[in-house]
Amino acid sequence: AQRVTQPEKLLSVFKGAPVELKCNYSYSGSPELFWYVQYSRQRLQLLLRHISRESIKGFTADLNKGETSFHLKKPFAQEEDSAMYYCALLYFQGGSQGNLIFGKGTKLSVKP
Amino acid sequence: DAGITQSPRHKVTETGTPVTLRCHQTENHRYMYWYRQDPGHGLRLIHYSYGVKDTDKGEVSDGYSVSRSKTEDFLLTLESATSSQTSVYFCAISKTGQKGTEAFFGQGTRLTVV
């Protein structure tokens, strides 16, 4: 069965320090992975997706199929990065467009 | 925000009462989803819809039902609310474009069952 694992519930770093939020997945098909972010009392929004190979707000994430990982990284954390981060996997069942399954989330706290 | 609105935004209800949450979208998307968000559990899929009157169960569907009588509205009903259903509920739509599939979320409904 498909699964997304985010091992850290909380990650606390100081401003300017590097950040890595871990995500591992389990899926028998070809994975399509995403990182979503939720700032305080706001809706979830897409941060980045692996197929775009883009950098958003200084964040990058590389899909490593050998390690089944999709870790989110930023070299220098900013206070405004403090938020809840969710890793998500798009899986397909039947003829659907695909459903997203989310990890449990990691709360990032960037201290001044 | 892909034109998604949820109502109500906050609700307090008593155990055993029925509750209906509404998700409304303005962009005619086919796929709609209901998730619940709980600390330590992340987001879990309750039900989803792939068209008018076409719905299916997600990971945590027990105690919930849904209806979609028209494209723009996806209703989530708790037939008899329980305290374990206290949560934040998010509606989402998905659309596929040149960059692939992306989900857009509503602002959430905070439901408290007392």
Image (tube, coloured by chain):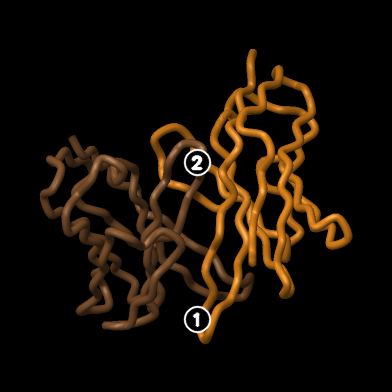
Chain colours: A orange, B brown
Residue A96 circle label? 1
Residue A25's place in the image compared with B85, above or below, is below
Q: Residue at x 67, y 60 (%)?
A: A33
Q: Which amino acid does label 1 sit on?
A: Ser
Instruction: Find residue A78 and report its horizontal and vertical position in percent.
Output: 66, 26
| Most distant residue in the right direction | A66
Q: Quadrant of the N terminus of chain B?
A: bottom left
Q: Residue at x 29, y 68 (%)?
A: B26
Residue A38 circle label? 2
Residue A78's place in the image compared with A58, above or below, is above
Neighbours of disc 1 within 10 Å: few (<14), some (14-19), many (20+): few
| Most distant residue in the bottom direction | A95
A8 relative position to B43: left or right: right
Q: Residue at x 54, y 74 (%)?
A: A98
B37 relative position to A76: left or right: left
Whether residue A47 is visible: no
Q: Closer to the camera, B42 or B26? A: B42
Mark 2, chain letter? A
> Mark 1 or mark 2, which is nearer the start of the sequence?
2
Q: What residue type is labelled 2?
A: Gln
B92 relative position to A17: left or right: left
Instruction: Find residue A110 and report its horizontal and vertical position in percent.
Output: 64, 22
Residue B101 sits in quarter:
bottom right
Q: Distance between the residues labelled 2 and 1?
A: 26 Å
